[in-house]
Image (tube, rainbow, N blue to C red):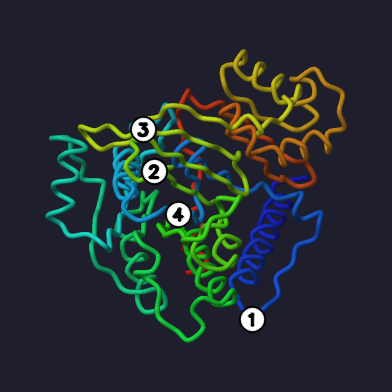
Amino acid sequence: MDEKQKSKELLKQMAREMRRQELACDPNRLHTMTMAEIYDTVYEVRPAVIEDLLFPGLTILVGDPKIGKSFLMLQLAYHVATGTALWEKHVRQGEVLYLALEDQYDRLQGRMFRMFDEKETEHLHIAIRSQQQGDGLEDQLREFIEKHHDTRLIIIDTLEKIRTETKDNGSYSQDSKFMYKLKEFADRYGICLLLVHHTRKQTSEDPFDKINGTNGLLGSVDSAMIFTKEQRTSNKATLQITGRDQPDTKIDLEIDRDTLGWRLTSINNELWYEAPDPLLTNLAERLKESGGSWNGTATELNTFLGTDLKPNSLSLKLNVKASVLYHNFGIIFKRDRTGESRHIELRLLPEKEVTVNDGNDDASSCA
């Protein structure tokens, strides 16, 4: 294929992609993708904000009143704003907005000084008042993100403070609609939106049944956290986490009586296990040996790996496993079509570096 034909093919690809985005952004059109198109798409990898704990999307944290949720929220916010490890977990630094809607600035001042002493950061932004969802909140959050492009985390404490009163409040339908709009916002901007909520008084064998509201709240989020104490006066607490794309986790914590920050005592996520994939392990080893980067066709990649898979099968498998490659091996996978062939690029990130597209590049396409 000569350069003129390549240019025409590239223009066709760009036109198809623009059309796909137009259809996806038009709420009045039913946008579909064929199975082949879904397989052929390299989906963006959105790294964790806090390793194994907080991910881009909508998260709800639920706990009884006055058991230390606000201290936990400040702790999460500070660690993301400064990029310092939390409970031995890697943290991806970025701007943080904390809507402490049940607090006052003077109380926050004393709490933060006790927790962090003289350490401070310009990357943690706090507000004690905001508009409600559907009545200006989205505009306020959007304005903040547009001003702070590196926003990673927005905490809303509490959910009820941003909820407009309607006659349908408390219904499954209303709960789902309320949460769907917040999830849509989080997904559009590639951020973690963390909602703080209270538990109901009734007991249940499943701790997630203690979320105050209908199943429309839990069913609409990407992950949920339950923060509990066996006794209100205890200095120990448990954080249980469940989510769509993360391991079910139980974290045992103990409060530091001096700083009132939460210390890790143990983590249990043994139920989460995925057998190692020899192909991906082999790829990671070969990439390290070759200097950390490689590019070429799937046929050439077969030779590089010493495998005899069908080129299309190899390319497809790596495409589907792009997220695993990133999270488990620190490898960025890219694939582009040039004419009839597919060009593959692989790059091994330096340890603990996280620089892939976090979703903000696509935010303007539907804004």
Residue 210 against residue 176 in the figure, above or below? above
Residue 53 against residue 279 in the figure, above or below? below
What is the secondary structure assignment of the residue under circle 1? loop
- Marks 1,3: beta carbons within 8 A: no
What is the secondary structure assignment of the residue under circle 2? loop
What is the secondary structure assignment of the residue under circle 3? strand
Residue at mark 3: 254
Q: Earlier in the sequence, mark 1 or mark 4?
A: 1
Residue at mark 2: 231
Looking at the picture, which amino acid does disc 2 mark? Gln
Looking at the image, residue 37 sits to the left or right of residue 93; the answer is: right
Residue at mark 1: 28
Q: Earlier in the sequence, mark 1 or mark 2?
A: 1
Looking at the picture, which amino acid does disc 4 mark? Val
What is the secondary structure assignment of the residue under circle 4? strand
Q: Earlier in the sequence, mark 4 or mark 3?
A: 4
User: Residue at the location (76% across, 21% down)?
Assistant: 278
In this rendering, the label closer to the viewer, 1 or 2: 2
- Marks 1,4: beta carbons within 8 A: no
Looking at the picture, which amino acid does disc 3 mark? Glu
Residue 304 against residue 27 in the figure, above or below? above
Looking at the picture, which amino acid does disc 1 mark? Asn
For disc 3, the neighbor class at 10 Å (few under 14, some 14 to 19, many from 20) is some
In this rendering, the label closer to the viewer, 3 or 2: 2
For disc 1, the neighbor class at 10 Å (few under 14, some 14 to 19, many from 20) is few
